[in-house]
Amino acid sequence: QVQLVESGGGLVQSGESLRLSCATSGFTFSSYFMRWYRQAPGKERELVAFIPTTGGNINYAESVKGRFTSSRDNAKATVYLHMNSLKPEDTAVYYCNTQSGIVNYWGQGTQVTVSS
């Protein structure tokens, strides 16, 4: 069945970098767009990036544009989020997501904490 597993989170200092991975299985990965979301405690869930099936023309939230880069490897059924110049406001649980019709699928999330 559909499975999304995020990894790569951790504790870093402001200005440092992390790379998150989302390994998927149970569906035809190359036929589905992917999303990265993040959510901090007490805050709304925020769309971070939208990755088309081909990996081209990726859309980013204004808050991360120029600092974050996403990519996908269809052969490995994995999507990545390269996070550079991290700020304390980037602290959140990061989730990958895809959608089939009205059904959304989510990973368990990975915690990113950025200290100042």
Image: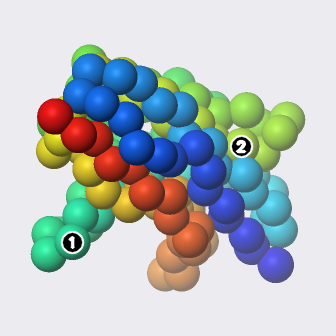
Q: Residue at x 47, y 46 (%)?
A: 10
Describe the element under mark 2 as helix, strand or loop.
strand
Amino acid of disc 1: Pro
- Which percent across, then down, holds residue 38? 33, 57
- Does 44 sit left or right of 50 as displayed? left
Q: Residue at x 71, y 43 (%)?
A: 78
Q: Which mark is residue 41?
A: 1
Q: Is residue 45 above or below residue 10?
A: below
- Does 84 sit left or right of 82 as displayed? left
Q: To which quarter of the image does residue 64 belong? A: top left
Q: Residue at x 47, y 31 (%)?
A: 18
Q: Is residue 90 above or below residue 25?
A: above
Q: To which quarter of the image does residue 27 belong? A: bottom right
- Does 30 sit left or right of 22 as displayed? right
* Quarter containing the C terminus: top left
Describe the element under mark 1 as helix, strand or loop.
loop
Q: Is residue 4 above or below residue 91?
A: below
- Viewer-closest of 33 and 92: 92
- Which percent across, then down, holds residue 87? 20, 33
Amino acid of disc 2: Thr
Q: Which mark is residue 78?
A: 2
Q: To which quarter of the image does residue 59 belong? A: top left
- Viewer-closest of 3 and 31: 3
Q: Residue at x 54, y 81 (%)?
A: 103
Q: Nearer the viewer, mark 1 or mark 2?
A: 1
